[in-house]
């Protein structure tokens, strides 16, 4: 049977991100060529392109690497090894996990490959050289000569001129290449099978990979064994102090003593911090290498992945054919003890951070800390305040759901129980009530925080008065109730700033004409520069219906007169409401204003001299703080109160101060 090498190479699956796989294959071949009882000795040299001019020699270090030379001092390309190399998919070294296809990845990424090998043949040293490319699959360039007896047995493999798309993805920094080599070949390092391993650059760089392994990867290696079905797995946990490169714990699934695929642990264990600290305060994370004959069996021929499902529903999964996610989840169940000494202080620190946020901003979540402290461990680490609030909100909703389910359980238990154990029911009900009260406190705290934020926003808006008076007009109106809206449009408003009774209503309209919200034939609406139209309010009991009219005026306005003033304006609105015997809203429902119930009017304005003159001439009574006036129109059964913007803010603060103090908001 003949093998179409060119077709074989074309059919190989090697993504650009696997650009170092051909180099890894050459390295592993060199390690496996070591004579029995010996340890591997390797030297790799990286060569950069020379086609571009550089200003100085140091700049060459930033040039693109295009070739590699791998030298080992193993047994060389003797007759058996050479024949195996020339046989596609040879099984000669299958016991070592060799699939006989690794050299084809060389041709997938590199233009040509040249091999020079000195080996022993019946105590005589020979030197074999040959080229390997898709255009020379018959080894026509092969040369075999006698070697000098002084020459050391060795093999040099030259991977020349890497091709796109692998070329552009190849790291230019030798440190990065060194790290990837160690990660891929880590099992050989862990098992002590390497005597020396150096990575050189053609610009004079030299990296001792054994030194990098010993300094970067801790010797405090722990091993854990676990099983899934009939498959046995072994995990090597070791500390990685090079956290700038690896920012999270990683799991590397290995096959045939080589790392094949890496997974970030955060994808499977969200509540594990990405960085730990040792007893000396040094930061690190874990690299976990997993080996198994199961993984050896199902690695693909390119050793870039596994012929295993990434994720399978546990109910449908065959225990003897676990998916990737099952392997990692089981790994963490067995290996959790490795993490625990570092998790406990991290969780304590994490909890303090959450408590600090709750005590200063997230007051409504205090009951979670008190009643479900272990839930805090499910919150991811190092979140911003905004994201932390979202996570706490999720826990709060889960807590409320638990309470609802418990309430239903108690009802069903009492309803269907043949033995009426009232003492036990009473005890359960008491516990449920206590938890329910915690929810109530939480919601109240949230509402109080909202009120404080609204008052702060109003206070800040008043500070804009000197800069842009008209902007203040819009801002204050919007804070209290969105302009040009009704209660059908918005669910939230802040009319409590003016009058707590306005928190509940049947119909609410802001900056709308009478005609648009009732059957009163009037198109009156405010001037675009002022807030002239009322907020109309009616409570939900027909026999006690009333109305509240709120009128805003431009801050610091001081040109009111007998024909243009807010007093006559709101009185005119009252006349429109009192005149008809029956008022219908825009949906045809009756708004019943009982003439025996007063209508309340609020005029919010700055008490300039012109408005004070009008109020005093009309016998309005000043309030004790002199920041407002009040008058009762007995003909219309209407109370009109005029208050300043400053009084509006100050009174709102006073009414809520006791609540703010309880939550340490002042």
Image (spheres, rainbow, N blue to C red):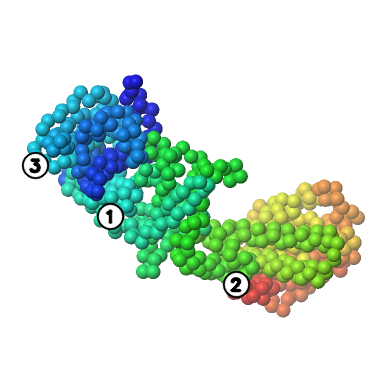
The quadrant where residue 360 appears? bottom right
Disc 1: which residue? 212
Which part of the image, by quadrant, shows the C terminus? bottom right
Q: Which residue lies most toward the bottom here?
A: 624
Q: Position of residue 419 (x, y in %)?
A: 85, 65
Q: Residues within 10 Å of mark 3 (few under 14, many from 20)?
A: few
**SS class, disc 3:** loop
From the top left corner, tell me how far across and down residue 484 is, in percent: 69, 51
How many other residues sit within 10 Å of disc 2, few (<14), some (14-19) or many (≥20)?
Answer: some
Q: Name the element at disc 2.
A: loop
Q: Is residue 325 left or right of residue 165?
A: right
Q: Say which of 481 and 117 sits in front.
A: 117
Name the image quarter holding the N terminus. top left
- The answer for how far apart the CA atoms under marks 2 and 1 are is 54 Å
Label ID, residue 150 = 3
| Spatial CA span between label 2 and label 3 | 86 Å
- Closer to the camera: disc 3 or disc 1? 3
The picture quadrant where one finds residue 539 is bottom right
Q: Are marks 2 and 3 in contact (CB under 8 Å)?
A: no
Instruction: Identify the residue at horizontal 26%, vertical 53% (top origin).
Output: 210
Earlier-in-chain disc, 2 versus 1: 1
Front-most of 156 and 488?
A: 156
Q: Which residue is mark 2?
A: 665
Residue 329 vs residue 63, the one in the foreground:
329
At x 32%, y 31%, the residue is 90
Q: Residue at x 33, y 21 (%)?
A: 2
Is residue 96 in view from this perspective? yes
Return the residue nearer the eye: 582 or 335.
335
């Amino acid at each position: 049977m003949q093998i179409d090498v060119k077709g074989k190479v074309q059919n190989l699956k090697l993504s650009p991100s696997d650009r170092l796989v051909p180099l890894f294959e050459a390295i592993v071949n060199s390690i496996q060529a070591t004579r029995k009882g010996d340890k591997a000795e390797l030297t790799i040299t990286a060569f950069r392109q020379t086609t571009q001019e550089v200003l100085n020699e140091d700049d060459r270090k930033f040039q693109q690497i295009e070739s590699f030379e791998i030298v080992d001092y193993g047994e060389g390309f003797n007759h058996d090894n050479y024949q195996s190399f020339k046989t596609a998919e040879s099984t000669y070294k299958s016991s070592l996990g060799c699939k006989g296809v690794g050299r084809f990845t060389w041709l997938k990424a590199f233009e040509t490959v040249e091999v020079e090998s000195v080996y022993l043949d019946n105590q005589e040293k020979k030197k074999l050289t040959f080229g390997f490319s898709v255009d020379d699959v018959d080894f026509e360039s092969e040369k075999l000569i006698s070697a000098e007896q002084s020459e050391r047995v060795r093999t040099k493999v030259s991977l020349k001129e890497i091709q796109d798309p692998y070329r552009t993805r190849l790291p230019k920094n030798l440190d990065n290449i060194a790290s990837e080599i160690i990660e891929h070949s880590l099992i050989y390092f862990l098992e002590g099978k390497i005597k020396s391993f150096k990575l050189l650059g053609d610009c004079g760089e030299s990296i001792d990979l054994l030194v990098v392994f010993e300094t970067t990867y801790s010797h405090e290696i722990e091993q854990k064994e676990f099983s899934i079905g009939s498959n046995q797995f072994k995990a090597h946990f070791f500390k990685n102090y090079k956290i700038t490169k690896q920012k999270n714990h990683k799991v590397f699934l290995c096959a045939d003593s080589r790392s094949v695929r890496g997974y970030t642990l955060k994808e499977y264990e969200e509540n594990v911090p990405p960085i730990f600290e040792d007893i000396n305060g040094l930061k690190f994370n874990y690299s976990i290498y997993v080996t198994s004959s199961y993984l050896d069996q199902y690695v693909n021929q390119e050793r870039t992945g596994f012929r295993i499902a990434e994720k399978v529903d546990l109910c449908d999964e065959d225990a003897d054919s676990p998916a990737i996610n099952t392997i990692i989840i089981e790994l963490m169940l067995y290996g959790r003890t490795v993490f625990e000494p570092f998790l406990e202080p991290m969780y304590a620190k994490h909890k303090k951070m959450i408590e600090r946020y709750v005590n200063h901003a997230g007051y409504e979540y205090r009951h979670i800390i008190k009643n479900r402290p272990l839930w805090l461990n499910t919150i991811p680490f190092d979140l911003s305040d905004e994201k932390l609030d979202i996570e706490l909100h999720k826990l709060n909703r889960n807590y409320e759901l638990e309470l609802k389910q418990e309430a239903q359980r108690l009802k069903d238990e009492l309803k269907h129980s043949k033995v009426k154990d009232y003492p036990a029911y009473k005890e359960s009900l008491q516990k449920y009530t206590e938890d329910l009260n915690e929810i109530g406190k939480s919601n109240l705290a949230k509402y109080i925080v909202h009120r404080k934020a609204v008052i702060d926003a109003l206070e800040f808006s008043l500070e804009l008065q000197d800069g842009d008076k008209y902007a203040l007009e819009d801002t204050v109106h919007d804070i209290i109730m969105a302009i040009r809206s009704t209660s059908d449009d918005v669910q939230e408003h802040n009319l409590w700033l003016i009058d707590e009774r306005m928190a509940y209503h049947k119909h609410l309209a802001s900056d709308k004409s009478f005609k648009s919200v009732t059957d009163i034939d009037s198109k009156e609406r405010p001037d675009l520069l002022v807030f002239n139209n009322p907020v109309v309010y009616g409570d939900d009991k027909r026999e006690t219906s009333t109305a509240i009219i709120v009128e805003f005026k431009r801050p610091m306005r001081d040109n009111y007169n007998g024909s243009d003033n807010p007093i006559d304006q709101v009185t005119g609105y009252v006349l429109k409401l009192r005149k008809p015997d029956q008022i219908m809203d825009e949906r045809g429902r009756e708004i019943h204003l009982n003439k025996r119930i007063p209508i309340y009017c609020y005029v919010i304005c700055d008490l300039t001299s012109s408005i004070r003159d009008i109020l005093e001439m009309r016998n309005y009574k000043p309030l004790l703080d002199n920041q407002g006036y009040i008058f009762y129109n007995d003909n219309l059964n209407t109370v009109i109160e005029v208050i300043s913007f400053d009084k509006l803010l100050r009174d709102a603060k006073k009414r809520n101060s006791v609540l703010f103090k309880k939550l340490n908001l002042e």
